[in-house]
Image (cartoon, rainbow, N blue to C red):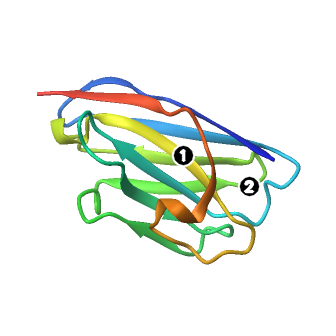
Amino acid sequence: QVQVAESGGGLVQAGGSLRLSCAASGRTVTNRAAAWFRQAPGQEREFVAAISWLGVTKYYADSVLGRFTISRDNAKNTAYLQMNSLKPEDTAHYYCAAGRIGRMLSRGGGDYDYWGQGTQVIVSS
């Protein structure tokens, strides 16, 4: 089992920045990709960014490319999402997810086994 916990959300003005953290714990944390998804009220969950276990491969949604950066520190079992130049349309509940051991990096939520409760990000205009 793997437990995932997000932190770092909050209220920020448009153009501002936030850094989300995703801490993982459990017996089988290693060799798992990490990803961020988000869900706005009344909308479906959408992919934001993903990073491979070694951090070599990263995927981003087109809507955040150039503004968001995903990273990880495996020594701390933590992944991060640095969000810059935030826009009101980035307002959503952000979730971190841990992928299946040894699985290739994916943008699909179904390829991630463990999810956190999420953290709220609100961007005011």
Report the disc number at residue 78: none
For mark 2, what is the residue?
Answer: 74
Please tell me how crowded label 2 is: few (under 14), some (14-19), or many (20+) other residues with Cα within 10 Å.
some
* Residue 11 against residue 109 in the figure, above or below: above
Dots 2 and 1: beta carbons under 8 Å? no
In the rendered image, the vertical position of residue 40 relative to residue 109, given as above or below = above
Answer with the quarter of the image where residue 87 lies.
Answer: top left
In-image side of 26 versus 76 (left or right): right
> Would residue 119 be found to the left or right of residue 111 on screen?
left
In the rendered structure, which disc, 2 or 1, sits on the residue that comes first in sequence? 2
Residue at 63 percent of width and 64 percent of height: 33
Residue farthest along the left direction in this orientation: 125
| Left/right of residue 114 with respect to residue 10 in the rendered view | right
Q: Which residue is mark 1?
A: 96
Report the side of 55 relative to 46 (left or right): right
Percent x, y for residue 24?
Answer: 71, 43
What amino acid type should be assigned to the residue bearing mark 2? Asn
Residue at point 47%, 51% (across, down):
36
